[in-house]
Amino acid sequence: MKEMHNEDVKKEKAIIVGLRTAKSNAFDLPLEASMTELELLAETDDVEVLGSMEQSLHAPNSRTFIGSGKVEELKMMATELGVDMVIFDDELSPRHQRELEEALGMDIKVIDRTALILDIFGRHAKTREGQLQVELAQLEYRLPRLTHAWTHLARQAGGGGGRTGNVGGVGLRGPGETQLEVDRREIRRHLQKLRESIDKIRENRAQYRYQRKKSNIPVVALVGYTNSGKSTLLNTLANTDVYTANQLFATLDPTTRQIELKDGQLVLLTDTVGFIQKLPTQLIVSFRATLEEIAEADLLLHVVDASNPSFGMQKVTVLETLKEIEASELPVITVYNKIDLLSSEEIDKLKSRAAPASAFISAKKGIGIEDLVSKISDQLMLQFELVTVLVPYGMGQLVSTFHEKGKTLTIENLETGIRIHGYLPKQLLSTFEIYRTKPVK
């Protein structure tokens, strides 16, 4: 157990708590790194962390998550430090949360990593789309947790120490339980409205993507762990000024900019929300309309903070999230960022272990940007093949498909048909196979 102090008395004060179990996922961050990340999440949410506590168990305690003895120790620590809340590194069940609040008392709030991330998202969502998506995730998280909140009120109002009071010897539903049902119905009704609104957004995005594909401009999506430097890289490549900060989830709403590569090719570069370990399921579901931007991209730039000691685990987290949103099969360039913070020996070691399709940059200092741009051009061209086709007259749809999906270099009207020379996406080669001819010298 360690203690940390901060002079800022305006912030809410908290203790963070982590549990190490035998069932921990081998791909998760080590508990110490996860706790450091939780502290940064708290600071991002304007909460001052005064102390931390760790516990090791074979499995979470069924009642108090960390065991009754550790809860007593936590209660003493909370009293000594005068904190407002306790933040757990794992998502708590409604029962765990209720038992912990009752055990700690003293008006101390008990929240978990999920609630903290949801609150940060709520603060950082600027667009109407982002706000709707965050609200949906927050309500879906809170709905099963309404019970303990209203049970607390029922005990106060009913006077009988339970959900029901007793009048004239007849059991009646108490005010807390009545309000609980009203709240549940109202939240479910509101959830349905939110889902309908987000479905409309999803339809609009799908229409936008369709129009964008017709423009024949490739889409390159920036993905990565939160605070890996994606927005800084977007600013460097597009010479723009998207907000950046050295904190988790500094930017939330997706941003798209058009850039021109060395060969004159135009590319749409999209920055999306950063990932994090234990990313709440509610957020992945509610942000699916936004995350589909990633799944529809032609190329992913996986930005990695090479200066972070846990970057290997962070890479795994990103890859697992990409699998969840069905984007794991897309072409990827791994971009190791912040190499200006590494020694030359560390950089050499990193390069020796990295995959061939990798780039090593400092987005902030502009190091390695030209090499990255070249790799983007090369990777996009790998998805095309140079062909010459002779399409018979009367098959205008095929000509349109070549224009929309490929890159036309020359086109000629001959007696036997329309000859097109250019690049076609490899997945369309079979469609044009019978019309292929020798290129004109």
Image (cartoon, rainbow, N blue to C red):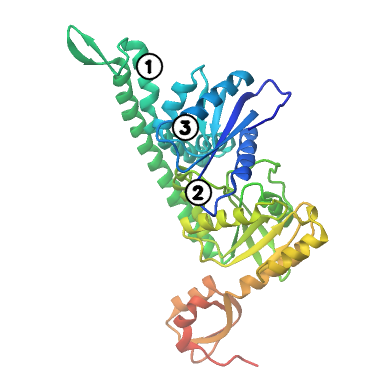
Does residue 223 appear in the picture of this structure? no
Quarter holding the N terminus is top right
Sequence-wise, the earlier of marks 1 and 3 is: 3
Q: How much space separates mark 1 and mark 3, taking CA atoms?
A: 26 Å
Q: Secondary structure at mark 2?
A: loop
* Mark sitting on residue 153: 1
User: Which residue bears the numbered disc 2?
Assistant: 24
Quadrant in the rendering for residue 75 = top right
**Is any part of residue 340 visible from this angle?**
yes
Q: Residues within 10 Å of mark 1 (few under 14, many from 20)?
A: some
Q: Position of residue 204 (x, y in %)?
A: 46, 50
Query: Is the Cβ of the residue at disc 1 closer than 8 Å to that at disc 2?
Result: no
Q: Is residue 155 above or below residue 300?
A: above
Callout 2 amino acid = Ser
Amino acid bearing label 3: Gly
Sequence-first disc among 1 and 2:
2
Q: Residue at x 71, y 42 (%)?
A: 246
Q: Nearer the viewer, mark 1 or mark 2?
A: 2
Going from N to C along the chain, the mark reached first, 2 or 3, is: 2
Q: Secondary structure at mark 3?
A: loop
Which residue in the structure is indicated by mark 3?
A: 67
Q: Is residue 381 left or right of residue 145?
A: right
